[in-house]
Image (tube, rainbow, N blue to C red):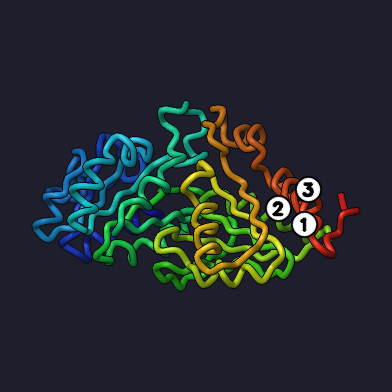
Amino acid sequence: MTYEDTLREIVRRDERVMVLTAENRAAIRNLPHELNGRFIDTGITAGLALRGRVPVIHALAAFLTMRAFEFVRTDVGIAGLPVKLVGGVAGFLSEANGPTHQAIEDVALMRGIPPMHIFCPADEQDLIIGLPHLLASPQPVYIRHTALPPVVEHDPHFEIGRAERIADGSDVTILVYGMLLKQAIQARDILQRQEVSVRLLNMRMLKPVDAEAILAAADTRLLVTLEDHFITGGLYAIVCELLVRHQIRRPVLPLALDQRWFKPALLDDVLAYEGFTGPDLADQIRRFAIRQQLAGWPADQG
């Protein structure tokens, strides 16, 4: 079962759903001839939602969230219409594309629109699990599309605004969303071998975010936020805002892009160059913990 298969089934069950694209059919290339009048190749189209339809719009994430931002904010956000925005090749998935096509501020932009929900699945299986719930929601939704194969068997129980606990741990909590779940698992495995107990959360949704899971994670000695996004406005900002709101003091290590676009290359090379491979992440977490002089941290482990 793929994203395209899942969307096809939803469209067949619910006559309100219409599929739209702005000249980007990569994720839905087999649907146009099957959907007849319920497929439109156009730009942002809020008028359909005003007539009781549920538009599912596909475009490159960089253009959908930046070039069309004012229309999304005004026509979809202010009206609170149930438009679903599916952004392609977000974050590191744009790999060989330069800064103009890199959507690494998309989460920050979309979370600034009051009614907008944000879904960042780790892989295609995760996307398929959440998709029916989000298309059924009356809220506008921004979805970071991914067709990556799963690296874990995801919990089939999906709830809007709830994270998925991948692993338990008591020393460190890694909070991650999107494609970097694979690298987070690799980093956890390395740290576990170094006798560091690591909790791992696949956040799934960044708005509404699972505040309960984040606050519970503060019982570990270190929180790590991992994202293929600018450090500003993404998961790191969300976690810090939440901790401050609840007056909780805890070290937080952001592993993100610090106000710079990434060097275009093939995905594996991007991850290696930018320091986002599993071993790179584990090393950064270990070094930060040692600098912070966290009690009981196994500093002698390499």
User: What number is the disc on residue 113?
Assistant: none
Q: CA distance from mark 1 to mark 2?
A: 6 Å
Quadrant in which residue 42 is drawn: top left
Considering depth in this image, is 168 or 238 the residue closer to the camera?
A: 238
Q: Position of residue 221 (x, y in %)?
A: 72, 65
Q: Position of residue 261 (x, y in %)?
A: 52, 31
Secondary structure of residue under mark 3: helix
Q: What is the crowding at mark 1: few (fewer than 14 residues within 10 Å), some, or many (at least 20)?
A: many
Q: Position of residue 34 (x, y in %)?
A: 21, 49
Which amino acid type is shown beneath numbered disc 2? Ala
**Of marks 2 and 3, the one in the foreground:** 3
Considering depth in this image, is 2 or 122 the residue closer to the camera?
A: 122
| CB under 8 Å between discs 3 and 1 | no
Q: What is the crowding at mark 3: few (fewer than 14 residues within 10 Å), some, or many (at least 20)?
A: some
Q: CA distance from mark 3 to mark 1?
A: 12 Å
In terms of sequence position, does the residue under pointer 3 or pointer 1 come before the other? 1
Q: Which residue is mark 1?
A: 191
Q: Which residue is mark 3?
A: 287
Quarter of the image for the N terminus: give it.
bottom left
Q: Residue at x 20, y 54 (%)?
A: 78
Which amino acid type is shown beneath numbered disc 3? Arg
| CB under 8 Å between discs 1 and 2 | yes
Q: Is residue 115 left or right of residue 15?
A: right
**Of marks 3 and 1, the one in the foreground:** 3
Q: Is residue 276 left or right of residue 204?
A: right
Q: Is residue 118 above or below residue 97?
A: below
Q: Position of residue 278 (x, y in %)?
A: 69, 47
Which amino acid type is shown beneath numbered disc 1? Leu
Q: Which residue is mark 2?
A: 187
Q: Is residue 90 above or below residue 114?
A: above
Q: Is residue 181 left or right of residue 17?
A: right
Work out which residue is located at the far right of the displayed protein and give it: 300
